[in-house]
């Protein structure tokens, strides 16, 4: 069975929280997530543990469990 997935870049928002809220409102269960919406760069040179936990928590709180971080 196929699962509908979304590219997070298609939902630009002012903050990570707003970004994830919009994605969650679509009802999707699969997201290809671009780190730009969380840290400002698709491929940051470093990603702090705090930033990673913020993204993870945002996904868990919105039940977006199938995520691929890019």
Image (cartoon, grey):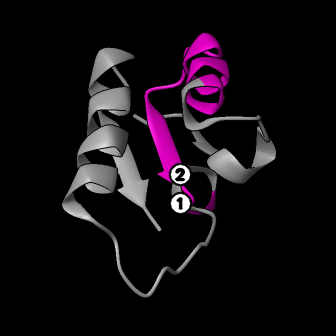
Q: Residues within 10 Å of mark 1 (few under 14, many from 20)?
A: some
- Of residue 29 and residue 16, the one placed in the foreground of this image is 16
Q: Is residue 7 above or below residue 56?
A: below
Question: What is the x, y in percent for residue 8?
Answer: 64, 46
Using the rendered view, name the quadrant where residue 10 is placed. Answer: top right
The residue singled out by tag 2 in the image is 38
Residue 30 sits inside the magenta stretch: yes
The residue positioned 59% from the left and 73% from the top of the image is: 42
Q: Please tell me in which quadrant of the rendered image residue 18 appears.
A: top right
In the displayed structure, would residue 47 be above or below residue 44?
A: above
Q: Distance from label 1 to label 2 (Cα)?
A: 4 Å
Residue denoted by label 1: 39
Q: What residue lies at 53% left-to-right and 60% top-to-bottom?
A: 39
**Nearer to the camera, 3 or 40:** 40
Magenta stretch contains residue 56 = no
- Asked if disc 1 and disc 2 are in contact, CB closer than 8 Å, the reply is yes
Which quarter of the rendered picture does the N terminus lie within?
Answer: top left
Within 10 Å of the Cα at label 2, are there few (<14), some (14-19), or many (20+) other Cα atoms?
some
Query: Position of 68 compared to 25: left or right?
Result: left
Q: Is residue 26 above or below residue 17?
A: above
Q: What's drawn in magenta, residue-wise?
A: 18-36
């Amino acid at each position: 069975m196929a699962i509908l997935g979304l590219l997070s870049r298609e939902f630009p928002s002012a903050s990570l929280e707003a970004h994830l809220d919009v994605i969650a409102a679509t009802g999707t269960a699969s997201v290809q997530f671009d780190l730009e919406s969380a840290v400002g760069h698709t491929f940051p040179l470093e990603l702090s543990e705090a930033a990673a936990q913020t993204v993870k928590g945002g996904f868990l709180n919105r039940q977006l469990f199938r995520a691929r971080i890019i």
